[in-house]
Image (cartoon, grey):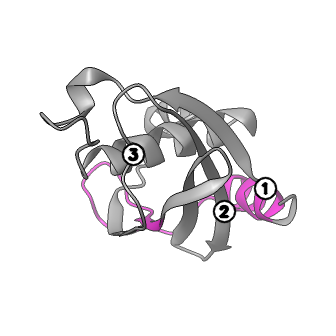
Amino acid sequence: MSFSITIRVRYAESDQMGVAYYSNYFVWFEVARSELMRQHGIPYSEWEKSGLFLPVSECYCKYVTPAHYDETLEIRCWIAEVRTRAVRFEYEILREGSVLAKGHTVHVCTDRDAKPSTMPPALRDTLIKAAKDR
């Protein structure tokens, strides 16, 4: 399932010229990813309570054109791939239907000690279902 959320670029997220600072795109990715997971009934807080963590092992962003202070942006997120120990999320950031940036993050399943572990079947099944709903 593709999830979409709308944000407005805040003053603190831009430089003196009003251009959104590049690292904010990863924050916006995380906002959309967290809401996507919440929509599927598995918020990060629940994973962590059970001892499961999904740290980022890879992140990428292709910047096409800049976002500016006070613009309204749409952040799209979907699950592209689910593996035994990892999940890949894809993102698009749009302004009025035009793509400003595209990216992805890969998250590896670990335990509390940051040791890689196999994803619990219930979580994996939910992620696979969410990926198919796109």
Looking at this view, is 123 or 20 the one in front? 20
**Three-letter amino acid code of the residue under disc 1:** Ala
Residue 110 inside the magenta-drawn segment? yes
- Contact, mark 1 vs mark 3 (Cβ under 8 Å): no
- Name the residue carrying label 3: 67
The C terminus sits in image quarter: bottom right
- Contact, mark 2 vs mark 3 (Cβ under 8 Å): no
- CA–CA distance in space, label 1 to label 3: 29 Å
Which residues lie in the magenta part?
Answer: 102-131
Q: Residues within 10 Å of mark 1 (few under 14, many from 20)?
A: many
Does 109 appear above or below 34?
Answer: below
Q: Residue at x 39, y 30 (%)?
A: 9
Judging from the image, what secondary structure is the residue with disc 3 in?
loop
Tell how many labels: 3
Q: Earlier in the sequence, mark 2 or mark 1?
A: 2
Q: Nearer the viewer, mark 1 or mark 3?
A: 3
Mark sitting on residue 79: 2
Mark sitting on residue 47: none
Looking at this view, is 22 or 95 the one in front? 95
Residue 82 found in image quarter: bottom right
**Three-letter amino acid code of the residue under disc 2:** Ile
Q: Earlier in the sequence, mark 1 or mark 3?
A: 3
Q: What percent of the width, then of the height, locates residue 53?
A: 40, 50
- Name the residue carrying label 1: 130
